[in-house]
Image (cartoon, grey):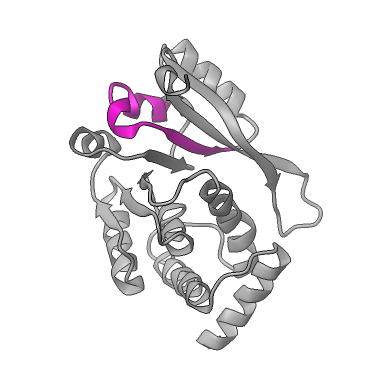
Amino acid sequence: MTSSDQRCSLQDSLRQHGYEFPKKTVSQLARFCELLWEANRQVNLTRHLDFPTFVARDLVDVMQLSRLLDQGQEVLDIGSGGGVPGLVLAIVRPDLQISVCESVGKKAKLLNEFVDKLQLPVSVFHDRAENVLDDMSFDCCVARAVGPMWKLLTWLDGRWLAARRMLALKGPRWVEEVSEAKSRGLTRGLVIQPVARYPLHSTDPQAEQVESFIIQAIPATSSS
């Protein structure tokens, strides 16, 4: 498929979900997918290997997340993996200051290659989130498919002055995840609640309809 054909295929998927982007953004999204899918042959990064699935699953999540971020905010993507949501967020929201962290060396190296080839102003940290937050501060941390809520809250425990706010993309079991985190004593002093709820789109018309959520965790003093 030529790059022109790719853009047309991606545009069709974008239209189906009501998204309109400048040509440069569409080209960057297509190029990101090309890089991701090529790298996926060597390193397991994604199961979403065509434009309809990328848009329905990855981009829909990113666009929901985007609505919750103010102009110019500094954002850390925890455990970025193949670059979703961090790199995609940097493409569709160039006003944001995006950093991504990834503790797995092979994935961090690929993220650096993606950033260079896409010419994105994104900082890539080959490190654990705890270490990054010990040295730097952000307006918001985001996480998708990294681990259960208790694990995310463990990483941020004692680091809320640096993290300030967490937005975690979750499925319908988020309530059980928060309950487990509470049983481990990790929710004290925090306000945790869903701030977005939307259908989890599937390219399979026979698939059962389920919902996705974005769960926000912030210090209780920040919510007053």
Q: Nearer the viewer, residue 181 or 191?
A: 191
Q: How many marks?
A: 0
The residue segment tinted magenta is: 151-170
Give percent across and percent down for residue 160: 32, 26
Q: In the rendered view of the protein, which quadrant contains the N terminus?
A: bottom right
Q: Is residue 135 left or right of residue 17?
A: left
Give percent across and percent down for residue 119: 32, 71
Q: Is residue 171 left or right of residue 2?
A: right
Q: Residue furthest left?
A: 135
Please say whether residue 37 is one of the residues in the magenta stretch.
no
Q: Quadrant of residue 17?
A: bottom right
Please say whether residue 166 is one of the residues in the magenta stretch.
yes
Q: Residue at x 78, y 45 (%)?
A: 208
Q: Nearer the viewer, residue 2 or 141?
A: 141
Q: Residue at x 23, y 49 (%)?
A: 126
Give percent across and percent down for residue 198: 68, 43
Q: Quadrant of residue 78?
A: top left
Q: Residue at x 59, y 68 (%)?
A: 50
Q: Is residue 209 left or right of residue 119?
A: right
Rendered view: 158 above or below 67 = above
Rendered view: 123 above or below 189 = below
Give percent across and percent down for residue 219: 41, 21
Q: Residue at x 35, y 53 (%)?
A: 98
Q: Residue furthest right?
A: 206
Q: Is residue 15 left or right of residue 90?
A: right
